[in-house]
């Protein structure tokens, strides 16, 4: 991404409360803020609105982009846990790895991760009407990817950990690497993608290539062919577990 109207702020070891106060003050005056020497400060970009941008150099702390409402964040490195917690809209691009619970309860926007991610990514992700959140993961995912998934799209280019999509009851997970049938949990279906799926996959992977193409050995195939769709068997796949 390239932006005009940019100011640079160095955080170093500044405590997260004071750091966020300075970042918010900078965003009040400028549309784009470049953060340097970031050292695990939490809540960066919290509730950031459309038209505002953070360019993060270093390692942001937990809950970056929490409740974000249309802004954009690009991280030139790794990110810690709970990126995009309850994110409503906007975009996060991570030129590295993301930690646990990325996209927790996310309800809109998109997160692109060049490499892998930790456990419970996409947990409780949901969608409503035209809002359809998406997470694209370029590497492997830890255990419980898509746990309790209620809506949205997850694309995984690497390999999934154990307990994939535990409690999933909505949305879809697209897998580049098919999992063994005995690892598909009860209430879920793994099947080849169709033309509609390929369009969704192709659009998101096209954006993935746009962000990370110069850092990849080769661009990712955007045809969507060869992917597998993991979805709930019905709209209430676990109804008999809790009601007669």
Image (spheres, grey):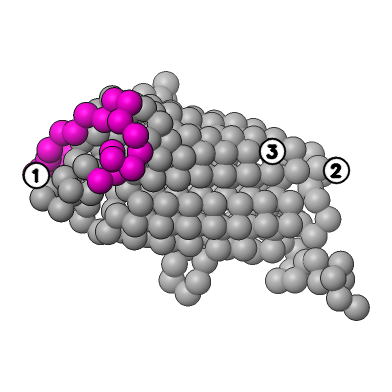
- Which residue position holds label 2? 182
The region drawn magenta spans 2-21
SS at mark 1? loop
Q: Nearer the viewer, residue 53 or 169?
A: 53
Q: Looking at the image, can residue 183 be seen? A: yes
Q: Position of residue 97 (x, y in %)?
A: 48, 30
Residue 58 position (above or below residue 160): above
244 vs 85, nearest the viewer? 85
The answer to which image quadrant residue 168 occupies is bottom right
| Residue at (57, 44) in percent of width and height | 101
Q: CA distance from mark 1 to mark 2?
A: 54 Å
Pinpoint residue 127: horizontal percent, then vertical percent.
52, 66
Q: Residues within 10 Å of mark 1 (few under 14, many from 20)?
A: few
Dot 2 lies on which element? helix
Question: Which is nearer the eye, 159 or 49?
Answer: 49
Q: Splitting the image into 4 quarters, where does residue 20 fall?
A: top left
Q: Are marks 1 and 2 in contact (CB under 8 Å)?
A: no
The numbered mark, 1 or 3, whose residue comes first in the sequence reads 1
Q: What residue does disc 3 label? A: 143
């Amino acid at each position: 991404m390239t932006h005009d109207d940019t100011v640079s702020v160095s955080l170093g070891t500044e405590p997260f409360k004071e750091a966020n106060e300075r970042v918010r003050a900078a965003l009040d005056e400028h549309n784009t803020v470049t953060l340097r020497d970031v050292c695990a400060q939490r809540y960066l970009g919290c509730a950031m609105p459309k038209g505002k941008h953070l360019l993060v150099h270093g390692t942001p702390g937990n809950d970056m982009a929490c409740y974000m409402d249309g802004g954009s964040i690009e991280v030139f490195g790794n990110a810690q846990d709970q990126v995009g917690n309850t994110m409503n809209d906007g975009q996060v691009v991570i030129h590295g790895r993301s930690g646990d619970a990325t996209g927790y309860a996310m309800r809109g926007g998109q997160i692109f991760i060049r490499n892998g991610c930790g456990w419970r990514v996409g947990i409780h992700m949901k969608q409503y009407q035209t809002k359809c959140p998406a997470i694209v993961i370029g590497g492997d995912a830890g255990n419980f990817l898509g746990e309790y998934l209620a809506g949205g799209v997850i694309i995984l280019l690497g390999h999934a950990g154990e307990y994939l999509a535990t409690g999933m009851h909505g949305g879809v997970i697209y897998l580049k690497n098919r999992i063994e049938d005995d690892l598909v949990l009860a209430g879920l279906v793994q099947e080849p993608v169709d033309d509609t799926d390929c369009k969704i996959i192709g659009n998101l992977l096209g954006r993935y290539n746009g962000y990370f193409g110069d850092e990849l050995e080769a661009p990712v195939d955007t045809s969507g062919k060869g992917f597998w769709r993991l979805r709930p068997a019905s709209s209430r796949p676990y109804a008999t577990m809790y009601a007669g």
